[in-house]
Image (spheres, rainbow, N blue to C red):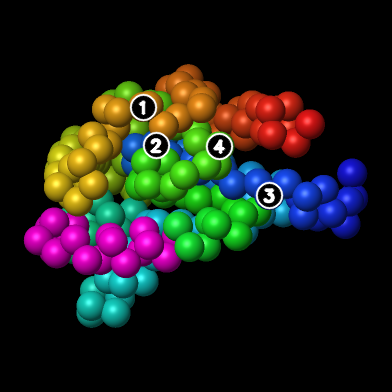
Amino acid sequence: MTRSKRTKNRSQESLTICICGMAGSGKSTVAKQLAQKFDLQYLSGGDALKAMAMEEGYKNIERGWWESAEGLRFLEKRNRNPEFDKEIDEKFIELAQHGNVVLDSWTMPWLLKGGFKIWLEASTEVRAKRIAHRDGTNFEEALTALKNKETQTRNIYKKLYGFSFGEDFAPFHLILDTDSLKPDEVYPILCTVISNMLLK
């Protein structure tokens, strides 16, 4: 199907997809791939928060920053002041209402009405190994940073919105275990699901 035909079909029925999962589950990689495949706008909650961090004076914001000492300090600041998260979430809800978007977000599955919501599951150990490989660090350092980050993140969302991040799966239409899957294996599975469930 050509791009023009896909765009025409989508004008009749808008497509909104939420991709969620803990750090190292592969959500950002596959969300970008799906956005490109289906001609959707890609919105990343993590990227939006990093932009806010830069405005606050944080530096060296690159891949793996969230697990760094500086990234964890910003996480503590967000824990004390939830306005960072609220501002981004409100903007994402507004943008999502226009449709034709892939949301790479830890909050939208719970906050957004409508849309197709996917959770990518992976064990803590597997995710820590992936992050260690990605960032060129060792497994123990990655595991410690991961646990610290996720404890604080859960606290933020529990306090701000009342949901249990990583424990409450009620909003999701699909849960896919990625422990034994590579990114290039996750992507075609989700393409098939979206094509068969949302585009027919």
Q: Which residue is mark 1?
A: 169
Specify the amino acid type for callout 1.
Phe
* x and y, in percent, of residue 64 in the image: 33, 54
The numbered dot on residue 116 is: 4
Q: From the image, state whether disc 2 or disc 1 is nearer to you.
A: 1
Q: Earlier in the sequence, mark 4 or mark 1?
A: 4
Q: Earlier in the sequence, mark 2 or mark 1?
A: 2
Task: Identify the residue at image location x=50%, y=50%.
Answer: 103
> Which quadrant of the figure has residue 68?
bottom left
Q: Which residue is mark 3?
A: 14
What's the magenta region?
A: 75-92
Of residue 183 and residue 108, the one placed in the foreground of this image is 108
Q: CA distance from mark 1 to mark 3?
A: 24 Å
Left or right of 56, for residue 39: right
* x and y, in percent, of residue 95 in the image: 52, 62
Task: Identify the residue at image location x=50%, y=33%.
Answer: 118
